[in-house]
Amino acid sequence: MSEQGVSGGAAPPAADVVEFFDTTLRDGEQSPGASLDPLAKLQVARQLARLQVDVIEAGFPASSPGDLEAVRTIAREVQGPAVTGLARAVRSDIDAVHEAVRDASRHLIHVFIGVSDVHITEKLGLDRAQVLARIREAVSYARSLCTTVQFSPEDAGRADPDYLCEAVQVAVDAGAGVVNLPDTTGYCLPFEFGELVSTVRSQVRGMAGVLVSVHCHDDLGLATANSLAGIAAGARRVEGCINGLGERAGNAAIEEVAMALRVRRPLLGLGDNLDARELVPTSRMVAALTGIGVPPNKPVVGGNAFSHASGVHQHGVLRDRRTYEIIAAEEVGADGTQIVLTARSGRHALVHRLHRIGVDLPAGDLSAVWARFLEVADGSKQVEDEVLIRIVGEVHGYRPGAAAQ
Ligand code: KIV
Ligand code: ZN
């Protein structure tokens, strides 16, 4: 049996620290079109270690021999985060996860089974009592192989709360050290999900020594809000994917939850172990390797997250970026505040961009360039540096870097 603490090898997190469990390589890889070959998975896992996530869920080892091998390679080669894999509540899946992760210096086994009535009857063809028996058997068996077992009652968000508590009680009594509450279908509203987490924490006996985690899907665009509601209700681990990848509409985006915790730290008083400067590099790597691009307006990691296009906003951020930015681009490894020139831009932005390309016009010469800039901008989405150079050349014959005459 491996020697590990409750949270997958490290000591349980301090009450004021939220751990990040990254499932980009499992739930994220289940996004249609996102599958990764073993080498790409290893590359992402190494980057997740640089990001300093606490746990990497590297795959679903029972799903294919190739995935088992990919998880095993990550477990052997990636240092830092604990490594886990997903198992249905059956011995063969649990054996596959154990086989795949046992060589990691810190590892855990993640066991799940559906607990909503529609999962129990329609998907599993069981009754409630049979599911409880499966939980007892699976968690006990996983505990016989590994010190740390995480139990996920799938579809907790739509389960009868009393039955959910019974299911979690059985898992805790059988030795689960981590209870992860999934809103599998992204159904809950934030206040409800927070209540669900509180109910489980208060109704199940023995929760003092158990780490509560949350796993929220984004079917209604509430995954980040629900994750934060869970954290506010006492969860100290959050599961998610880079770029919000995951089944259907995806999982909570790690970068969104992380930056919400950081930006609102004065209110929430919670820390984390991430190196946030790796968020954008990680996002770019995942986008490149999965082929699933990041929408420009995606919070934190989207191409527009630190871009300002309107004159009012540009004037503000050029005076003090805090007027319209709550995150500094450098904090998340982004390229910096971008002043984008469009037909909605103002003169301050034009002067700023001209200065960046080495053109400092005497005040009297700006108006003609400004007028021509507006004509060009009205006919295009953005005015790039090459076009600006052309405009000043046409209007005044200036060349970048040449002293204004
Ligand atoms: O969404 C879900 O319920 C899951 C579990 C297996 C944790 O991905
Ligand atoms: Zn999921």
Image: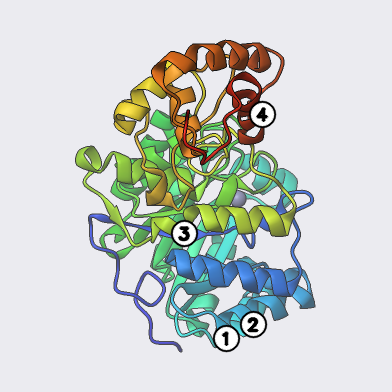
Cα distance between the residues tagged 3 and 2: 23 Å
Which residue is painted at 36% across and 29% down in the image? 318
What's the residue type where badge 1 is placed? Arg
Residue carrying label 1: 76
- Total labels drawn: 4
Task: Give the secondary structure at mark 2.
Answer: helix
Task: Check whether the beta carbons of the residues at disc 3 and disc 2 lie within 8 A of each other.
Answer: no
| Residue at figure coordinates x 67%, y 22% from the top left | 381
| Distance (Cα) linking label 4 and label 1 | 55 Å
Q: Nearer the viewer, residue 212 or 131?
A: 212
Mark 2 or 4, nearer chain start: 2
- Front-most of 278 and 244? 278
The residue where tag 2 is placed is: 73
Q: Which residue is mark 3?
A: 278
Name the kind of residue labelled 3 in the image. Glu
Residue 73 in picture, x, y percent from top left: 64, 82
Residue at position x 72%, y 50% in the image: 31
- The residue closer to the viewer here, 311 or 347, is 347
Numbered disc in front, either 3 or 1: 3
Q: For mark 4, what is the residue?
A: 390
Question: What amino acid is found at the position of numbered circle 4 in the picture?
Answer: Arg
